[in-house]
Image (spheres, rainbow, N blue to C red):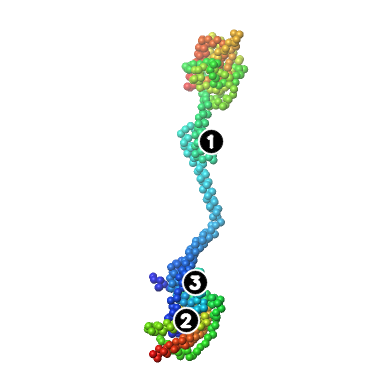
Amino acid sequence: MSDILVSDEDLMRKFCAGDSKAFHTLYMRHEKPLYRYLRRVLGVGLVAQVDEVFQDTWMRLVDARDSWQPRDGVAFKTWLYTLAHYRAVDILRKSGREVSADEGWLDGDSETAWQLWPASSAEQPEQQAFWRKAGQQLLHCLEGLPAMQRAAFLLHHEDGLSLHEMTQVLNAEFETVKSRLRYALSKLRLCMGAHLQPILEADATS
Amino acid sequence: MSLQDQHLQQAIKHAPDRELTPSNATRKEVLAYADNALKQTRETWLTRLFNIWREWFGASWHITGIGSALATVLVVVIFWHEMPDDSMRKVAASGDKTEVSESAEISAVDGVTSSVDKRVITEANVEKILQKKSTQVIAPRKETPSLSVVPQAPAPILKESQAPVAAAPAEASTPGLQDNAVVQSVPAGIISLSETAQPLPKVALDKSLTSSAKLDARVSKPISPKDGVADLLVEINSDGGVVTANKDIQALKLRLLALDEQSIQANGACLPPSQHPVVLDITTGYNIETLRVCNVSTSLLNEVEAYNQTMRNWHAKHENK
């Protein structure tokens, strides 16, 4: 059976049984997404800490493998990101950066500009260039979000975790998670709309 | 407001940090850490298994080990001592039983020595036994006397110039032929010179006697002087040796006679006849009574010879019975 078809939970079971190759597969499967997540959550100011937190997250996973029990509704990915998030929060707190500011602002005007964005399914070459610029701008906008809102957005939009799974990773109530995600989206839309609207308008006139 | 924004999701997918990866060093460290953890886990399981085993048997583990070692040593020691002895018995079984018993005695005394040492000791002991046996003289068994005549070897004649073999202390206090009964009562057996290591008188024997002799060194009681040496000599001279011997046989005076020619003193006088201490004839087991006389004549020698021959003939006849 190919390693691609094997679930994370089966690989983790094999690793717990002593199969080091299963861990290698598991690691390579989650290496880039986890590293991106930590890089984005920690932000530009703590970029030097990313490798340390990333390595420490995997080591904690290895050390805690005996306590891992696959349960319904709790995927390996959720557990992995929980470990990573806790470690990232520790670093953020030690660095003095704000991690609990859930307050945000909503700007109705940005919602109007948001409607001008091209369809998300567009894969044309010129559209890809646009989205590449949009992605770069989004990373800049993420830097302006509180860490918890940033984490909520990334977990939900980048890593595909459900709200229920996010409650475990973020160790927060469901409504709290929803609120954080809502604030994050509003801020990002405003930030992105302000940056991209001139581009969109120029493209529209041309 | 929807919590899923497709525009933002599309934007994050095209973010320029999409291909960010940790450094190779970080990757290697993580993978190596996992491998080491699994390796330690295997060792830990072995350790746990050992600990469990030690918990179950730990208390008696050392005792069991020491006990096993002691039991092994005990078995080795037992076989070390038993097997060589058995083999030595087998080797000695083809030889003299006396040698076997001697080697067994030495083996028992020197029980700690190795089998090789025992073999050497036993061989040395055999030589010792042989030397000891060479000093032993086997005396013939006494027979009940009866009247018959069988030709035998000539009677011994003692001469002063010849070397003595053995004799009792020179106590000529009570020489007599009646002591034959006492001599006959002496049981036959192995007699060692060490048992007779006493100062012995000088007794000369005839060559024929010493060569054939196989004389026993057993010392008998001295002859009583009341028997009268002079009367015996007169009787032999008058009646003859054969008649005298037959009379002695009827009287159960079983003995042999030897003549010791007494030297004449400076004044020409001859010492009165006397008797030497008695020795045993190895063939018959009879006492050999030495008669000291001056001027031993040929006729006297012949009669003494006839006397002794009569005695031997009688002994040979009844010995066969």
Amino acid type at image mark 3: Gln
Quadrant containing the C terminus of chain A in the rendered view: bottom left
- Residue toward you, B188 or A155: A155
Query: Marks 1 and 2: CB-CB under 8 Å?
Result: no
3D distance between C-alphas at marks 1 and 2: 107 Å
Which residue is the extreme one toward the left? Answer: A124
The residue sitting at 51% across, 10% down in the picture is B298
For residue B105, which numbered disc appears in the image? 1
Above or below, B183 relative to B23: above
Query: Marks 3 and 2: CB-CB under 8 Å?
Result: no
The residue sitting at 55% across, 13% down in the picture is B261
- Residue toward you, B256 or B75: B75
Residue B178 appears left or right of B314: right
Crowding near pointer 2: few (<14 within 10 Å), some, many (20+)?
A: many
Asked whether residue B100 is in view, the answer is no
- Foreground disc of the pair 1, 3: 3
Amino acid type at image mark 2: Leu
The residue sitting at 50% across, 80% down in the picture is A151
For residue B143, which numbered disc appears in the image? none
The kind of secondary structure element at disc 1 is helix
Quadrant containing the N terminus of chain A in the rendered view: bottom left
The kind of secondary structure element at disc 2 is helix
Residue A25 appears left or right of A94: left
**Circle 2 is placed at which residue position?**
A139
Above or below, B51 relative to A65: above
Amino acid type at image mark 1: Glu
**Circle 3 is placed at which residue position?**
A55
- The x, y position of residue A70, in whole percent, is 47, 73
Asked whether residue A132 is in view, the answer is yes
The kind of secondary structure element at disc 3 is helix
